[in-house]
Amino acid sequence: MSEQLKVKTMQEFMAEGKQPEILFWVGSAGSYDDRAKKITRAFVKLLNKAEVDFAVLGTEESSTGDLAKRAGNEFLFQMQAMMNIELLNGYEIKRIVTCDPHSFNTLKNEYPGLGGNYDVVHHTQYLKELIDQGRLTVKGEGYKGKRITFHDPCYLGRANSVYEAPRELLSKTNAELVEMKRHKKTALCCGAGGAQMFKEPEKGDMDINVMRTKDALETQPNIIATGCPYCNTMMTDGIKAHEKEDSVTVLDVAEVLANSLNL
């Protein structure tokens, strides 16, 4: 992360005898993937703008185990989960915010059964809270006249029924929001779920991301917005397959908001 961003670790908070408002769970993509790091930076800029007292785990953060579970390795998932739960409980973490719907779903719905009970929110939900509380004000003139369509990540939308928060945030930009035919409960997967992101397509597999990008392109957007680093990658690849990378951009909701504030 660039030096101008204020990011403190839980170890630093504990050394000061303090607790943060939230723990920002960065996730594997947000930590290591160069494109997803831009989403992480955008969200951190928004947190700093709203003067949120937040912490990250830093080098202590590990995978939630989501991918292991989806790929059928329950033993590895439970090993990773128990290690994380021990760490989170040791720090007495109460509230977790993440930009990754896969981490969001796992921490929210699968950790409680193993002893990890936290208030887990997606970053679009948290940003909406900050705006509702008056801690963050969006001036969206930069997107006036632009067409934005929102792709619902599976683990945010269909799995957890979070549909309105990202759309409300995008509406603050004064852009024209256009819906795909398949959206909200009927949205098509980007093709990355179930650990498919990390394997080559098998013979006969459909290019789901190309199909989903076609849904988006039919709305004639300037921007395809999403709230998941994996969806971002799959939709970006889909745009390349349709040879539309010169005219359509894929951005996370946090990036749209940060851009509208010139952060």
Image: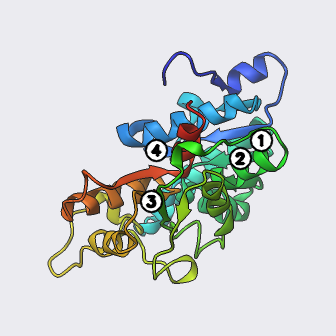
What's the amino acid at mark 2?
A: Ile
Image disc number at residue 96: 2
Q: Which of the two marks, 3 or 4, is nearer to us in this view? A: 4
Q: Position of residue 255 (x, y in %)?
A: 52, 43
Q: Residue sitting at 69 percent across and 43 percent down? A: 86
- The answer for how far apart the CA atoms under marks 3 and 2 are is 19 Å
Instruction: Provide the residue designation for mark 1.
Output: 93
Where residue 104 appears, x then y in whole percent? 61, 57
Q: Which sits earlier in the primary sequence, circle 3 or circle 4?
A: 4
Q: Position of residue 186 (x, y in %)?
A: 51, 83
Disc 1 marks a residue whose amino acid type is Ile
Label 2 vs label 1, nearer the camera: 2
Of the image marks 1 and 4, the number of the one nearer the N terminus: 4
Residue type at mark 4 is Ser
Please give the residue where the numbered disc 3 appears in the rendered image.
67
- Mark 2 and mark 1 in contact? Answer it, CB < 8 Å: yes
Query: Which mark, by number, is residue 28?
Result: 4
Q: Earlier in the sequence, mark 3 or mark 1?
A: 3
| Mark 3 vs 2: CB contact within 8 A | no
Disc 3, disc 1: CB below 8 Å? no
Q: CA distance from mark 1 to mark 4?
A: 20 Å
